[in-house]
Amino acid sequence: MDDAKILPRKGGTHIDSTMKNTLRTADKPSPTPAQPLTAEARPVQQQQRRNPPIAGELTAIAQAQQGDGASFEILYNMHKRRVYSLCLRMLGNVAEAEDLTQEAFLQLHRKIGTFRGDSAFSTWLHRMAVNVVLMHLRKKGLPLVSLEETLEPAQDDGPRKDFGTRDLTLSGSIDRVTLERAVEELPPGYRLVFVLHDVEGYEHNEIAAMLQCSIGNSKSQLHKARMRLRSLLRQKANGKGAA
Amino acid sequence: MTSNRSRTSIECEEFQRQLPEFFDSGQDLLVHRHVQSCQNCSSLVRDLEYIAAQAKLLLPIHDPSPAVWENIHNALTRQQKDDDKSS
Ligand SMILES: [Zn+2]
């Protein structure tokens, strides 16, 4: 894939305007004619399932927009877990995740007046948090997309005895804690795309805009992330038997 | 045996090369002709679908430490004082 070498731009202040553009592009998902409707519909449903309306949220938003500090604290308590978990999964580091959770909510405080309610508040806030994390990673000069590496085709490992003969697939063998640990072990670029797509439910066109890479690149990174997870999880499944 | 095996592996390679697009298209891969005839790729597809499905179930389980709110609160209070001074 020749789109592989596209790396995020680095730098100081011009990143800010880039990020705003990214936000704007991503808020209005551009049509991707290549994708059939079913692929589009799935993540939207996921977003709705994951971001159900919270009782009292609308009142708290309205009052926080008027500058009411107590209502802002209510909003913080409603959303801190989601925002922090998102930061932590993207960053893989508690201290950074706490710093950026703080930064995301300070940004929320500055921008809450611009929330118009045309998307769910949580969707709007999470996008803000994602952008705070991405901007932080760019400032650190980290590539948001892993360098393209060749993927060896998965070979038939049937004859190998290490995975056990009773179970050729992972199905049913992993719990959430195991998956969570395996996600932490992913290389940062793979982890970003995996968390954004598979955990958070963003679509490839949105991720491509956020990471400033091509849609094809986003798809291939996701595939590699899942392939890497598969091998990590298989190792863990084997280790469990041996330990 | 050897020729059979290498033919299979070329088919596998070709199928797996297209997997990222196949997955994104939302089609049912388990009915794909190659998957039906290849245990290797069938187990791969099952695993990758399983991983994606499990990822959707990863809920936010982490809470930030109370220090995070304290820092936000302090920053906002400081900002409020500065605003009051300048106005
Ligand atoms: Zn195959």
Image (spheres, coloured by chain):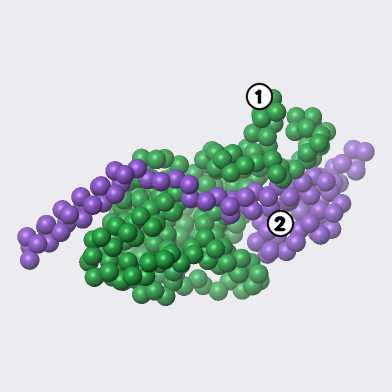
Q: Nearer the viewer, residue A202 or A181?
A: A181
Instruction: Please name whichever residue, A58 or A28, is drawn nearer the observer in this view of the structure.
Output: A58
Please give the residue where the numbered disc 2 appears in the rendered image.
B18
Say few, some or many: other residues with alpha carbon within 10 Å of mark 1 (under 14 / 14 to 19 / 20 or more). Answer: few
Tag 1, which chain?
A
Amino acid residing under circle 2: Gln
Q: Position of residue B7 (x, y in %)?
A: 86, 46
Query: Count of labels shown?
Result: 2
Q: Colour of chain B?
A: purple
Q: Residue shown at 87%/41% (left/top)?
A: B5
Q: Is residue A62 left or right of residue A170?
A: left
Residue at image x 39%, y 74%?
A117
On screen, residue A17 versus residue A6, left or right, reads left
Q: The C terminus of chain A is located in which quarter?
A: top right
In the displayed structure, A159 sits above or below A19; it is above
Mark nearest the camera among 2 and 1 is 1
Q: Which chain is green?
A: A
Residue at x 36% of width, y 40% of height: A95
Residue occupied by mark 1: A243
Secondary structure at numbered mark 2 = helix
Q: Is residue A45 visible?
A: yes
